[in-house]
């Protein structure tokens, strides 16, 4: 028997072994898309009908791995189908995988590289699994708002036990061969070079009757081996823990447990039917749509960045000017990802602080097992602290991260330009100041751009690469490449005050200021916005950013967009700044921060704050302002400014706006980004709601694009 398809190739080996290779032609990885599933159905039918086959080896033809899972680009098309059609589609895959499970000969999957999601679900339908010792397996579906729907909940709970299946499926992590072997999810672990040989050996033993593969299958076809008390203990305690951890906005992990529980007393086929039905329901939740859209958005911006970076110069060594909060974080990130970096400051103490910041971050990753002590020492040697420009002649790129002050930055950049080689790229980490303006006076403005990191640098994935009027393509490409090398997600944005993310964030803060001026308690606003999904409310966020930093940025934004961002009355940010309450950094802002036993500042209410904000209130309307009003008054300016950024061509697509907010601000992921959120709410409804806040000023005035899209029933995403 020979089969030579686009995704699968099958041939007969000696002794009646069919070797089925998964090797999707024209792709670097194997994934289950519609043609692949159709082809698998075809080849499985051929194998079933062939009396010569006495055993099956399922193996990957790709060195990188077995299968990365189902093709996520097809997900939304499936999820949009009517529920019965979606169930039919899932049942067709169940039928396929069950046919493999029901072959009347033993089957073995050889797992190399990665086997996740749908790939693991196919692997669990074979009798045995052999895994390369460096491979990783898992079920990442909950990260996309769904859970394994191709038999994963049914087979995993029967193979590994309900408790382990819950752990793996709810968390969505990937796991090592060692962990998988311990739980019996795989049967043998071998060196990568011996994978095929090992899998064939195991298959041979099963074919020779030395292993009872039929007994193993019977376990997978039967209900779970739990009595009523054990079942209640496992499922109910897991539901309480997982429900509490993920909360109502991320329903998939809890739903996965409920599905497993419902199927636990049933045989395979009935349990699979339940899984299909439940999966169809969870795939239709707004969370699943948002998380899949975010995933595709991530791929989209990643692809643009990688393509852009090709035109750049590789950064072999870098430098950072300024060893403050940001400079220290940038040095750490660069060194830990393999690009050596020189860190310069004018202040010896700052330099020591920058280094200690980097070593603190490294110690944390050693504690978490992500780094070895030797690795930590190596990273530290890649950061060279200095007070002089000595080493700057050799570096390819310098990030300027000195104090946010236009005059200081301009003079520092001018000085810096004379200290580096002609082709070196200078990139400013300014949060708000125009890159075009900072380039004035430079001799080589084409080599200058913005490289805006977010705080804390190691945790926030976004880097905005800002193109000034004179910035060259090479400067952009080189900076994008460096950001990628640092493990970040770069998004290229055109120059304007605040660039993309802060330009959209500040209108949100203005929404906050206006509410406080109408007497709404800032703690109430924080609570409402945290319930909406933000990791922290606006007042808490301002405290973390630093009230002084926010105040200075506010001035820049007001100058940049006076028609809508210049406040005529004193704002909450201004009042806190005048009171020298700079937030977490000096222990007092909207809240007060008291160090706990470990020295970590903990947020507490501060009785003095109300008194500082009271004089701002001209007329107290707080009693008539509902929680929904608070959400709308905070979110509308953000959506509208996002639309303006598109119309002003700061970025090209709503995807970039949304990914910027998700990765730079921690926008609630289950809502997608601000523009996706607006699309889901409906732009007509958004424009109408904005109309009710017209008296609040231009921040609440929908843009021409929004009105046009609302009139035609379109969305930001459709119109791109
Ligand atoms: N802190 C944030 O949340 C954040 C986020 C994104 C971007 N930024 C931007 O990053 C930059 C740095 O911010 P930060 O929060 O790290 O400030 P910071 O005050 O912690 O650090 C600034 C450092 O620059 C040093 N410095 C000043 N003049 C210098 C010079 N001529 N040469 C070398 N070093 C000099 C100072 O000694 C200080 O150590 C600013 O432009 C800021 O807007 C900050």
Image (cartoon, rainbow, N blue to C red):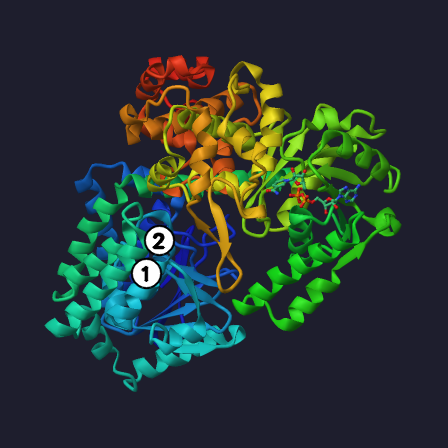
Give x and y (percent) for residue 190: 47, 77
Under circle 1, the secondary element is helix
Residue 480 in view: yes
Question: Quadrant location of ligand 1?
Answer: top right
Closer to us: 133 or 598: 598
Q: Residue at x 83, y 30 (%)?
A: 444
Q: Is residue 373 above or below residue 154?
A: below
Report the number of discs.
Answer: 2
Residue 538 in view: no
Q: Residue at x 40, y 29 (%)?
A: 634
Give x and y (percent) for residue 262: 15, 60
Determine contact: label 2, label 1, CB under 8 Å. yes
Report crowding for label 2: few under 14, some 14 to 19, many 20 or more residues within 10 A (C-alpha): many
Q: Which residue is mark 2?
A: 141
Report crowding for label 1: few under 14, some 14 to 19, many 20 or more residues within 10 A (C-alpha): many
Q: Residue furthest bottom?
A: 210
Q: Which residue is mark 1?
A: 169
Q: Is residue 404 above or below residue 243?
A: above
Under circle 2, the secondary element is helix
Give x and y (percent) for residue 153: 25, 61
Residue 514 shown left or right of residue 496 in the figure: left
Residue 660 shown left or right of residue 264 in the figure: right
CB of mark 1 near ligand 1 (< 8 Å): no
Residue 344 shown left or right of residue 271 in the figure: right
Q: Is residue 14 above or below residue 299?
A: below
Separation of disc 2 and disc 1 at Cα?
8 Å
Give x and y (percent) for residue 426: 76, 38
Closer to us: 585 or 675: 585
Labels 2 and 1: the sequence-earlier one: 2
């Amino acid at each position: 028997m020979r089969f030579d398809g686009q995704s699968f190739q099958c041939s007969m080996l000696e002794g009646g072994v069919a070797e089925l290779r998964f090797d999707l032609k024209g792709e670097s990885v194997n994934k289950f898309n519609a043609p692949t599933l159709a082809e698998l159905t075809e080849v499985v039918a051929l194998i079933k009908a062939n009396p010569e086959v006495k055993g099956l080896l399922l193996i990957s033809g790709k060195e990188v791995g077995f299968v990365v899972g189902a093709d996520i680009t097809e997900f939304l098309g499936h999820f949009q189908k009517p529920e019965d059609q979606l169930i039919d589609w899932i049942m067709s895959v169940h039928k396929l995988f069950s046919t493999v499970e029901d072959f009347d000969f033993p089957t073995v999957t050889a797992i190399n590289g990665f086997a996740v999601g749908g790939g693991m679900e196919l692997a669990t339908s074979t009798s045995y699994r052999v895994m390369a010792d460096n491979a990783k397996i898992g079920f990442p579906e909950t990260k996309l708002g769904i859970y394994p729907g191709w038999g994963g909940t049914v087979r995993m709970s029967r193979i590994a036990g309900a408790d382990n299946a819950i752990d793996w499926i709810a968390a969505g992590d990937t796991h090592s061969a060692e962990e998988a072997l311990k739980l019996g999810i795989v049967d043998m672990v071998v060196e990568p070079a011996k994978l095929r040989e090992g899998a064939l050996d195991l298959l041979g033993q099963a074919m020779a009757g030395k292993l009872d593969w039929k007994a193993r299958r019977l376990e997978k076809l039967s209900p779970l081996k739990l009595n009523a008390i054990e079942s209640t203990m496992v499922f109910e305690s897991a539901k309480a823990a997982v429900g509490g951890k993920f909360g109502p906005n991320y329903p998939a992990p809890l739903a996965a447990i409920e599905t497993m529980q419902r199927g636990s007393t049933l045989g395979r086929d009935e349990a699979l039917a339940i899984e299909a039905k439940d999966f169809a329901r969870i795939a239709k939740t707004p969370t699943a749509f948002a998380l899949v859209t975010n995933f595709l958005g991530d791929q989209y911006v990643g692809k643009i960045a990688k393509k852009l970076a090709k035109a750049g110069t590789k950064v072999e060594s870098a430098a950072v000017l300024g060893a403050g909060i940001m400079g220290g974080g940038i040095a750490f990130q660069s060194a830990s990802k393999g690009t050596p970096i020189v860190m310069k400051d004018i202040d010896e103490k700052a330099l020591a602080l920058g280094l200690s910041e980097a070593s603190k971050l490294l110690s944390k990753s050693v504690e978490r097992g992500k780094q070895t002590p030797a690795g930590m020492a190596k990273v530290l040697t890649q950061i060279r602290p200095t007070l002089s420009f000595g080493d700057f002649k050799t570096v390819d790129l310098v990030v300027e991260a000195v104090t946010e002050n236009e005059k200081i930055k301009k003079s520092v950049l001018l000085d810096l330009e004379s200290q580096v080689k002609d082709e070196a790229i200078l990139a400013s980490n300014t949060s708000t100041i125009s890159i075009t303006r900072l380039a004035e006076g430079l001799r080589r403005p084409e080599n200058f751009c913005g490289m805006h990191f977010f705080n804390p640098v190691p945790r926030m994935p976004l880097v905005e690469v800002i193109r000034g009027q004179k910035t060259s393509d090479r400067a952009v490409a080189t900076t994008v490449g460096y950001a990628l090398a640092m493990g970040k997600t770069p998004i290229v944005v055109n120059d304007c005050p605040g660039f993309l993310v802060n330009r959209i964030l500040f209108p949100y803060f203005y929404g906050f200021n206006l509410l406080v001026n109408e007497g709404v308690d800032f703690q109430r606003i924080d609570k409402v916005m945290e319930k909406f999904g933000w990791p922290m409310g606006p007042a808490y966020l301002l405290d973390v950013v630093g009230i002084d930093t926010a105040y200075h940025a506010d001035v820049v934004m007001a100058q940049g967009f006076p028609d809508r961002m210049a406040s005529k009355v004193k704002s909450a940010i201004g009042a806190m700044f005048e009171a020298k309450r700079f937030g977490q950094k000096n222990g007092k802002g909207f809240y007060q921060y008291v160090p706990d036993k470990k020295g970590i500042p903990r947020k507490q209410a501060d009785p003095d704050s109300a008194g500082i904000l009271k004089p701002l209130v001209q007329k107290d309307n707080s009693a008539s302002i509902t929680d929904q009003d608070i959400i709308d008054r905070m979110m509308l300016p953000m959506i509208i400014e996002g639309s303006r950024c598109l119309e002003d061509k700061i970025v090209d697509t709503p995807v970039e706006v949304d990914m910027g907010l998700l990765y730079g601000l921690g926008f609630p992921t289950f809502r997608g980004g601000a523009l996706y959120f607006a699309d889901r709410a409906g732009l007509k409804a958004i424009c109408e709601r904005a109309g009710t806040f017209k008296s609040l000023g231009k921040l609440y005035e929908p843009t021409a694009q929004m009105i046009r899209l609302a009139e035609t029933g379109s969305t930001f995403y459709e119109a791109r």
